[in-house]
Image (cartoon, grey):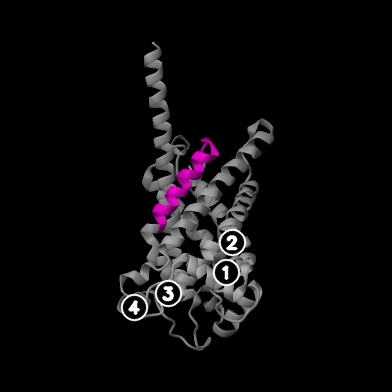
Amino acid sequence: MATTTLPPLVQALSGGTGSAVANLAIYPLDVLSTRLQTSESKGKHTRRQPSTPLLLKHLLDTEGLSGLYAGVAADTLSSLSSHTLYFFLYSFLRRQSLRRSPRSKAPSAAEEIAIGFLAGVGSKAVTLPLSNVVVVQQNENGSGGEGKRKGMREVARDIVKRRGILGLWAGLPATLPLTLHPSLSLYLFTLLIRLTLPRARRAKPRAAEVFLASASGSALATLLLYPLMLAKTRLQAGTGKSGGLVQGLREVYARDGAAGLYRGMEPQLIKGALNQGLTILVKQRIELGVIALYWMLRRQRAAKAA
């Protein structure tokens, strides 16, 4: 399942590793989504928006394959650190909740989401500067030409020079509500497993079942929260007029209508579903490997003692 009874550190390392593997596998979709989210249209009466296939062709023609991997090092590091911290905090807080509850009763849906929200706030507060560096790299570094792409340190210095040190935490107000996304995804994953599998197989679902349930949970969470995801990315990239989350949403709506609030959702939806599916799948496989290794070593010690 999404969480186990293994120590928080094991869950953190397995979840972080899973997220890094997933991030590397589907990173070009993240670049496409960011470019679409931060692109400017000519108004709500302009029907033709840049589509994902057209943008992909444009990037390959103008920047080559490297354009689809702009910022991949910083983003993988951000994903690894963010998910490692998230799963550590989530499993730690969940374990504390189980200890305090009578008869070790499983947390309710509201408690699960609240635990995930707190874990998400903690992880994002620490890793948001890396995330902001990634967004800038994905936009500014791919503007064409054959010049050398800026590294993480150089981009971070540019952000501080333009916006001050707090610029590294740009988009934090929009990020806080979005910390609901991983907890919603995990809850929906657990719910889908309960609804689709017989009780006897829920503890050890097949790899395909884990992937499909995780991907579906992430897709549903993305549909619910996407306008906030759009506003957060635009704030991080410094796109549009200065202002907060609500002002950013109003600006997009005034210019592009309701459809503008879902610009770039197609690659984000696919990326999020694949990312979550692969993350949970790899996390579960690692944890099963850890458990198998533990029992193997225990049997060896018992055999030697005999």
| Residue 287 located left or right of residue 241 | left
- Point out which mark residue 141 bears: 3
Element under disc 2? helix
Residue shown at 43% from the left, 71% from the top? 150
Decide: few, some or many residues near mark 3? Use Cα within 10 Å; few <14, some 14-19, many ≥20.
many
Decide: few, some or many residues near mark 2? Use Cα within 10 Å; few <14, some 14-19, many ≥20.
many
Magenta span of residues: 4-23
- Residue under pointer 4: 146
Viewer-side label of 3, 2:
3
Decide: few, some or many residues near mark 4? Use Cα within 10 Å; few <14, some 14-19, many ≥20.
few
Viewer-side label of 4, 2:
4
Calculate the distance from the C-alpha at mark 1 to the C-alpha at mark 4.
29 Å
Q: Earlier in the sequence, mark 4 or mark 2?
A: 4
Calculate the distance from the C-alpha at mark 3 to the C-alpha at mark 2.
26 Å
Calculate the distance from the C-alpha at mark 4 to the C-alpha at mark 3.
10 Å
Residue 6 painted magenta: yes
Viewer-side label of 1, 3:
3
Calculate the distance from the C-alpha at mark 1 to the C-alpha at mark 3.
19 Å
Give the x, y percent position of residue 101: 68, 36
- Residue under pointer 1: 232
- Name which residue type carries label 3: Asn
Give whichever of 228, 203 is nearer the camera: 228
- Residue under pointer 2: 178
Q: Earlier in the sequence, mark 1 or mark 3?
A: 3
Q: Are marks 2 and 1 in contact (CB under 8 Å)?
A: yes
- Name which residue type carries label 4: Glu
| Up/down of 235 relative to 128, above or below | below
Element under disc 4? loop
